[in-house]
Image (cartoon, helix red, strand yellow):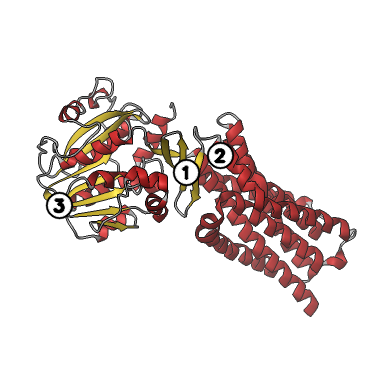
Amino acid sequence: MIHDQKQTNALYWASGIVSICGIIFEVLFGAAGSYLLGDGVKQYTLTISLFLTGMGIGSALSEKVTKNLLLSFVYVEYLIGLLGGFSIFVLFGVTAFFSSGTDAFFLYTMTLLVGGLTGIELPILIRKANEIGETLSRSTARVLFSDYSGGLIGGLLFVYILRPSFGLVKTSLLIATVNVAVALWVLWYFRKQFKRLKIHATVGAGLFITLFSGLFWAEEVAFTFEQKLYRDPIIHQEQTAYQSIILTKEQQDLRLFLDGQLQFSSSDEYRYHEMLVHTPLSAVNDPKSILVLGGGDGLAIRELQKYSTIQEITLVDLDPAVVNMAKNNHHLLALNENAFAGEKVKVVHEDAFTFLKEESQFYDVIIIDLPDPNNESLNKLYTLEFYQLVRNHLTPEGVMMMQATSPTFSKEVYWTIEATVKETGMVTKTMHIDVPSFGDWGFILAGKTPIEMRDLNDDIALRYLTDEVILSSQTFSKDIARESLEEQPKVNTLIRPIIIELYEKAWRAY
């Protein structure tokens, strides 16, 4: 009986470990879908739903396994290792070489298959534990305990260690080797119960070596696949705890992408940043304290450094990796003109919403240079609650200036953002300019009191912006003006995040 208890304990350990692997594959597929297909909430919802559906199908199919339970478990792990291990690697290849939509079909199919195989695991282990001598109720309870507790460990490992340290491709291969290693361990531990042990072990050893070797070459090959997603050669690639950072360069054109979304092109970014920075500064008399939310690339800070009267600049950016790159990458350092040098610039790595909730200081100008609202985490930075916090940190004569996506490509989104800002009681001015790498791009200027535009400072060297450009930017053609909307824009809030669906619908055609 002692020997039987040792065997059942071995099964419980196997159950816990493969459960960790299962939850990691589940969230890994969601992360891959979020990065390559966009709309993180949608992708995580679909992949988790498909994975759980697959587990249900797998559980039902496990009834067909009536003989050689342990051998069936071993080969299920082999299949999970093979399919799951190379899934993300192949997904990058599919995205690079096949038409749009094929990558989504492949990802969802793999999610369903790996989920189905994962669903077969636990019923087999429960039945085997019962076969060894455990009561059915006890074996079920203990295997499920191992499964659920393993799920928690897997989720924490993925978020805090695997994704930021290994990236998506290496993580899938690493976890797959664990699945195969568990199968090999089960083969060895229960070796007396297997016929043709050497054949089964050879298959597993060969698969383990293949997966392990992939840790050294697969990411590099996947990088060449990813390169095809971008027009120019990639010169810097980094996966952080928050996002994928890609820097490309072709001749003199440097481009930054965050999670696949273009943030700037060095050929025309001066248009964007001059509008973003110098317009609000011309609306405030002698501004001294500036808050920049986002803008970790340092390009907005570069423009602010042109004003000797500014006494302090606080930049809040969630991801330290972006700021570190801006401070150390020689391409970006040359473009931002070493913007972070000097004592007047203070950098805070924190969520902008949280920062405004906890900060008590007031600012003459608040510049909001955040990515577009294409997921839930960014949506909260485009809500009524967020703009109320911004308003509450402005001095009486202070103003805020923000990028607000394109009034041409996403008209409903632009005017929804403006309506949300106005709901705070602030007075708004709507503006848009042509930035060739972006197209027609919108901005919103707002303050607690009516905004009086002053002439630009003649002592500040500008390449694009003039008083006439600022004036003309406030004129909208009939087809994109607020009056062209079929219905009046609603307010975007934390409880009703309407802007995400509007954004996805608007950009689907481009």
Q: Which comes sooner in the sequence, label 3 or label 1?
A: 1
Q: In the image, which disc is placed on residue 288?
A: 3
Q: Judge whether 381 appears above or below 272 on screen.
A: below
- Which residue occupies 79% across, 74% down? 4
Q: Position of residue 373 (x, y in %)?
A: 36, 41
Secondary element at image label 3: loop
- Which residue occupies 64% across, 49% down? 115
Q: Nearer the viewer, residue 251 or 473?
A: 251
Q: Judge whether 218 appears above or below 503 on screen.
A: below
Q: Position of residue 319 (x, y in %)?
A: 39, 53
Residue type, mark 3 in image: Lys
Q: Label 1 belongs to which residue?
A: 246
Q: Horizontal placement of 135 versus 431: left or right?
A: right
Q: Nearer the viewer, residue 473 or 69?
A: 473
Q: Position of residue 49 (x, y in %)?
A: 56, 46
**Looking at the rendering, in which quadrant would you find the C terminus?**
top left
Secondary element at image label 1: strand
Q: Which comes sooner in the sequence, label 2 or label 1?
A: 2
Q: Nearer the viewer, residue 328 or 363?
A: 328
- Which residue occupies 57% across, 47% down? 29
CA–CA distance between discs 2 and 3?
Answer: 44 Å
Q: Label 2 belongs to which residue?
A: 226
Q: Judge whether 510 appears above or below 349 on screen.
A: above
Asked if labels 3 and 2 touch by Cβ distance under 8 angstroms, the answer is no
Asked if labels 1 and 2 touch by Cβ distance under 8 angstroms, the answer is yes
CA–CA distance between discs 3 and 1?
Answer: 34 Å
Q: Horizontal placement of 251 versus 307: left or right?
A: right
